[in-house]
Structure formats: C-alpha cells, structure tokens
Image (cartoon, helix red, strand yellow):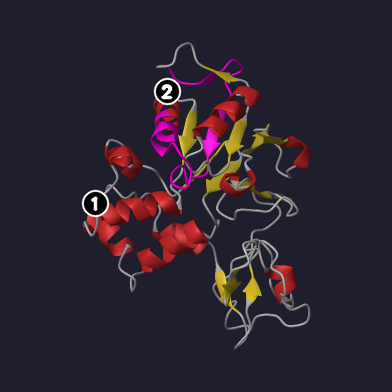
Amino acid sequence: MSGFDVIGDVHGHAGQLLRLLAKLGYERESSNSAFLHADGRKVAFVGDLINKGPSSSEVIKIVRGMTDSGSAFAVLGNHEFNLLATNFVGEKKIENEYREHLDWLLTLPFSVEFEGIRVVHAVWHPSSLKVIAGRTCSDEDFLQRAITKTSPEHQAVQTVLKGIKLPLPDGQVCLDRFGIPRSRVRIRWWLDPSGLTYSELLYPAHEGASTYLGPSLEDLTYVEPYPIYEPAVFTGHYCLPVREPKINGNVACVDGCVTCDGVLWAYRHTGEQILNSLNLVQSD
C-alpha cells in the first residue's frame, strides 16, 4: 500500500467530496462501483459524514461503497453518534435518507490505528479510548451505557467525539468563530497545558481569550498530552477557520468547515510521522 488520504468532515456535501476524490486521483468504473486509486492508496474518513449539507445519503453511499470495497475506512463522528442515539431511544422519527444506512453506521469504530497513523474524530485520549476499545454502537448494552450521562462510557465517548472542554474563569466568555459566546472552550488537547494561558490553549483560537490567565490544575487533570514521538494522528470536528493552522507536529485536524467556507480538506499521507502542510489538499 502506498499511503492514505485523510478526508475531513464531509457533512453531506457530496459535490465537494466528489471533486476532492477526483483531485486525489480516485476513480470509479461506473456510477455503481466504488472509488479506487490506481496506486492502491486508501481514504481515511474522520467522521461527521452527515448533516448540514444537502446530500448526506449520497455521501454515505460513496463512503460505504469504498469501505465495502476496501479502498477506505471511516470512524464515527459525533453527528453519526447522535443519530444512532436518537434512533435507539426513539424520541423522534429518523429522516428517511438515513434509515437504510443505520445498520452500517452502527458498525463504525471510534478510532483506528495502523500503518503508522491514528484516526479519531476529536481527541486521541488514551484513557477514554481504553474504556471503549473494541466497542461499537451495534452493541445495544454499550450504546445504552454510552448515552447514560453518569457512566464512564458516556464520558469516554463524549471526549473522543467532541473534544476536551475547560471552563473559563467565573463570568468570562469568549466568542467563537460564529460570534457565539462560550463559557466552556475546547483546547489544544495534544499540548502539555502546564503554565499555558487560555489564549495559548483554546482550539481554535477565540477572540477575547486571556493572554495572562490559565486553567487551574484541577481543570487540567483530565488532559493527556500527545507526545511528539507518537504516530501521526488525524482528527476532524473543530471547524477550523482559514487562518488556523491544520498541522501541529504529528497532529492534524482536516476539518476546514466545508459548510461555512465551501472547501473540503484532505491530507495526503505517505508514511511521515511529522506532518507537512504542503501535503494538504483542498477540493476547490
């Protein structure tokens, strides 16, 4: 195998996905066949295939066809998990476009690791990944525990799918990229947070974050920094604005917020452990 192309959160934008696959060199013999790469490369999807865009069902069909044929793999995103949880408790009707794909979505893993790369939707958090290792939502007992807020499984799933959030000091808020005030904020989970300020830790950067205050030691007890000598790890989830770097040493976020900015991102990986922004590819 000659490498992986890691594709960010597609969110139902099938047109952008088709353009990006073509740019990366993937083709299919007919409209009913799976996309394949002539050099044997494979795609890694970081989750959040659905919602927001106009054609979630078409995106799932493309990704499912590729995973079934062995030319791709995908991990679960928080949007897929929320859909499966909603269907499990039966509180509201599931849209028809998702019904035929529920059984397949149930089988998606929370993370994968092989060929020198790791892929997870939001955070490579060893303690949480240990709690849910080998589990999928196809196990109803596990899914019940994963949606039960007091369970270790729930905390683990929320961490790996949604990121690590820290509270801001009392009364303080930051504005995210959409101008929404936040009192709890996601952080650069791979860093050792000791001695860092909020402006250094918040991910992506937030307007108004303190340049002199940092989280308390108590707030940081759940953080597990990601060593620079570990394999390259890829995430999505963070809806990064254009100004925010996607590459941080051996960590990459390939979610450039396709719904907001109209661009779908990928990273063309060829075995390197320290990642290079020159290997980023965009759909348009």
Q: How many residues crowd mark 1 within 10 Å: few (<14), some (14–19), many (20+)? A: few
* Quadrant of the rendering where the C terminus is positioned: top right
Q: Is residue 32 magenta?
A: no
Q: Amino acid at mark 1?
A: Lys
In the displayed structure, would residue 192 be above or below residue 27?
below
Residue pointed to by mark 2: 69
Q: How many residues crowd mark 2 within 10 Å: few (<14), some (14–19), many (20+)? A: some
Indicate the position of residue 5 as horizontal and vertical percent values.
61, 33
Q: Are marks 1 and 2 in contact (CB under 8 Å)?
A: no
Q: Quadrant of residue 32?
A: top left
Q: Earlier in the sequence, mark 1 or mark 2?
A: 2
Q: Quadrant of residue 63?
A: top left
Q: Amino acid at mark 2?
A: Ser
Q: Quadrant of residue 67?
A: top left
As rendered, which of 124 and 208 lies closer to the eye? 208
Residue 93 numbered mark, or none: 1
Indicate the position of residue 203 as horizontal and vertical percent values.
66, 63
Indicate the position of residue 62 as horizontal and vertical percent values.
44, 28
At horizontal 62% and vertical 21% (from top left) the residue drawn is 25
As rendered, which of 267 and 142 lies closer to the eye? 267
Indicate the position of residue 28 as horizontal and vertical percent values.
50, 15
At horizontal 35% and vertical 42% (from top left) the residue drawn is 105
Disc 1 versus disc 2: nearer the observer: 1
Magenta-drawn segment: 33-61
Is residue 24 left or right of 62 when viewed as pictured?
right
At horizontal 37% and vertical 68% (from top left) the residue drawn is 152
